[in-house]
């Protein structure tokens, strides 16, 4: 199910709202929590349903429902990546670390040789 958060103006008053899209109509009620994962973040939305105010279907069979919501809280976790590195990327990183460690060892040996002279 897809969720779009925004606002709706009803009877001259602006309310928080959420619109859903799915192959079947939604029937949200009470307190809801939604988790959406993206390449660079995971977003959590928590909200309470006040009322369902609109429902429609399109010619492709998609169902749309809109709700007035309250107590909307959003948390964005930008530290949890949506993409896990491949084994090859991890191997490349390990090789780079080993090469850097070898360079440090070579430099240490050269310093010791210079100190012995």
Image: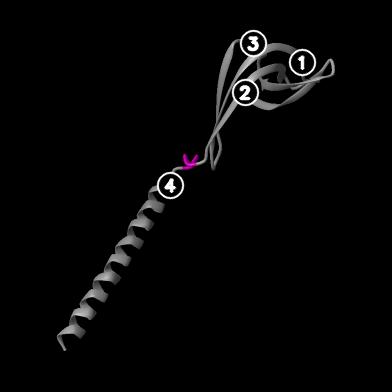
Of tags 3 and 2, the one toward the viewer is: 2
Q: Which residue is mark 3?
A: 27
**Numbered disc 4: secondary structure:** loop
**In 3D space, how far apart are the residues under numbered discs 4 and 3 (Cα atoms)?**
38 Å
> Is the Cβ of the residue at disc 1 closer than 8 Å to that at disc 4?
no
Compare marks 1 and 3 and give the one earlier in the sequence: 3
Compare marks 3 and 2 and give the one earlier in the sequence: 3
Q: What residue is at 61 percent from the left and 10 percent from the top?
A: 29
52 lies left or right of 82:
right
Compare marks 4 and 2 and give the one earlier in the sequence: 2
| Depth check, front residue: 10 or 35 | 10
Residue 116 locus on image (x, y percent): 15, 85
Compare marks 1 and 2 and give the one earlier in the sequence: 1
1 lies left or right of 94:
right
**Magenta stretch, overall SS:** loop
**In 3D space, how far apart are the residues under numbered discs 4 and 2 (Cα atoms)?**
33 Å
Residue 69 locus on image (x, y percent): 67, 18
Compare marks 4 and 3 and give the one earlier in the sequence: 3
Q: Quadrant of residue 24?
A: top right
Image height of 74 relative to 54, above or below: below
Q: Which residue is mark 1?
A: 56
Q: Quadrant of residue 17?
A: top right
> Is the Cβ of the residue at disc 3 closer than 8 Å to that at disc 2?
no
Image height of 107 relative to 80, above or below: below
In the picture, the disc for residue 72 is 2
Span highlighted in magenta in the image: 79-83
**Numbered disc 1: secondary structure:** strand
> Is the Cβ of the residue at disc 1 closer than 8 Å to that at disc 2?
no
Compare marks 1 and 4 and give the one earlier in the sequence: 1
Q: Which residue is mark 4?
A: 85
**In 3D space, how far apart are the residues under numbered discs 1 and 3 (Cα atoms)?**
13 Å
């Amino acid at each position: 199910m897809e969720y779009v958060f925004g606002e709706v103006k009803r009877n001259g008053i602006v309310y928080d709202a959420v619109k859903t899209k799915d192959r079947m109509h939604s029937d949200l009620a009470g307190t809801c929590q939604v988790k959406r994962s993206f390449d660079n973040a995971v977003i959590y939305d928590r909200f309470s349903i006040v009322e369902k105010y609109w429902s429609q279907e399109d010619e492709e069979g998609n169902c749309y429902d809109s709700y007035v919501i309250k107590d909307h809280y959003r948390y964005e976790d930008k530290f949890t990546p949506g993409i896990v590195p491949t084994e090859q990327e991890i191997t490349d990183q390990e090789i780079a670390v080993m090469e850097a460690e070898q360079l440090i060892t070579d430099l240490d040996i050269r310093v010791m040789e210079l100190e012995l002279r």
